[in-house]
Each structure stands twice: as structure tokens, then as C-alpha cells.
Image: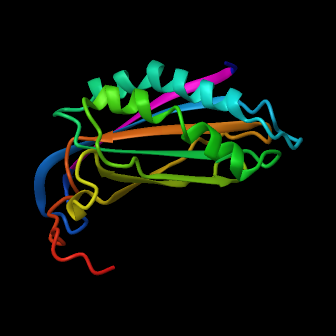
Amino acid sequence: MDVRKTMIIKETIEADGFGKACDPITRVVAVAVIQNPFAGRFVDDLSPLFDVSGQLGERLMGDAVDMLAGSPVSYGKAAIVGVDGEMEHGGAVLHPKLGKPMRAAVGGGKALIPSNAKVAAAGVPIDLPLGHKDEAWSFDHFDTMTVMVADAPRPDEIVVCMAVSDGPRPHPRVGSGPITD
């Protein structure tokens, strides 16, 4: 695994967008900037990226969970692939092996882990979706954290992001009413 750098981003929300105080909500993102072994070429077998992401999950998710103020309730993942790569490279690092260490770190995880991937230049942000780890239709926990790394991804890199949160959005009012959408 060729990792250029890792980062942990911790955010504590103490008030909503209007300044109304809320119970503190901690959100943490573990980020790894890795070399894309398939940059610049088409390859059918992307399984080496599956293995890399599983290793990253084992290496970083525990640290992210440890930085929460409370127990983890939400999670999500995202990838930004450098411009010499393709969207499928992002899919390969997000699925199918990253989920297992993420679920282990949060102590469960019955729900699908929300994800997002894109191809972009260095410094471009990505909106990392969050959802409740066990209740897929907990609307209060549908959230987004915007993440970026100033110098990544370089054209031959991938930024891999894994997020956890110990609460819902501040002052959630959507609830989990009848599902009609």
C-alpha cells in the first residue's frame, strides 16, 4: 500500500446555522491519500484496490471512532480519484472491502454505508454523505460533510475518506414519517 499521507479531521457542531445552540455533535473523517496503481491505463481487475481500502479501514477507522465525544451512530465514505484515473477506481476503494472494518469500528452497521466518488483535480472538495449505521431510514441522520485536501489528489492518486458521527443534524425536524420518495 503506497500511502502519501493521512489526516484526521474533527468537527464539533455546537449550534445550527442560525446560531441556536444544540447538543454537541462530533463528526470525524479519516483521510488517506494513496497512489493509484491504475492511473493512466484501463485494467479489468481492480481487486488490488479492494485490498488497499480494507487495510486503510483497519488502520484508520478505530482512530476516527476514538475521537468522537460519544458513541458512533452515523457513518459514510467517499473517494476523489485524480484525473489520470476513472470513477471505477473510486468504486473499487469504496466497495467491497472498506465496509467490514468500518462496521467493526462502529460496533455494528446494519445499514448500507452511504458513499460518493468522483474524478477531480487536487484541492476539489467532495460531499461525503452520512447515514445512521443501523437504521437506513432515519431521516434525522441524513447528513453531509464536505471534505477536501489542498494538495490531493494528484493525477495519479486517490483520496479515500471514512467518516463517523456521534449525532444527527442539529435540531433535526424531518423525522422518519411515511416513506413516499
Q: Quadrant of residue 47?
A: top right
> Residue 12 lies in magenta, yes or no?
yes
- The image shows residue 149 at horizontal and vertical percentages of 58, 41
- The image shows residue 19 at horizontal and vertical percentages of 18, 63
> Residue 119 lies in magenta, yes or no?
no
Number of marks? 0
Looking at the image, which residue is at 28% across and 45% down?
133
Which quadrant is the C terminus positioned in?
bottom left
Its colouring scheme is rainbow
Please tell me which residue lies in front, 43 or 121. 43
Q: Is residue 83 left or right of residue 72?
A: right
- The image shows residue 61 at horizontal and vertical percentages of 39, 27
Which quadrant is the N terminus positioned in?
top right
Q: Is residue 95 left or right of residue 110?
A: right
Q: Is residue 156 left or right of residue 132?
A: right
Looking at the image, which residue is at 73% across and 35% down?
46
Residue with the most extreme right position: 41
Please tell me which residue lies in front, 154 or 39. 39
Magenta: main secondary structure equals strand
Q: Is residue 71 above or below residue 134?
A: above
Please tell me which residue lies in front, 105 or 112. 112
Q: Is residue 101 left or right of residue 84?
A: left
Looking at the image, which residue is at 87% across and 44% down?
42
Q: Quadrant of residue 173?
A: bottom left
The region drawn magenta spans 3-13
Q: Is residue 41 above or below residue 130?
A: above
- The image shows residue 56 at horizontal and vertical percentages of 53, 24
Residue with the most extreme bottom position: 180
Please tell me which residue lies in front, 3 or 116. 116
Looking at the image, which residue is at 45% across and 37% down?
162
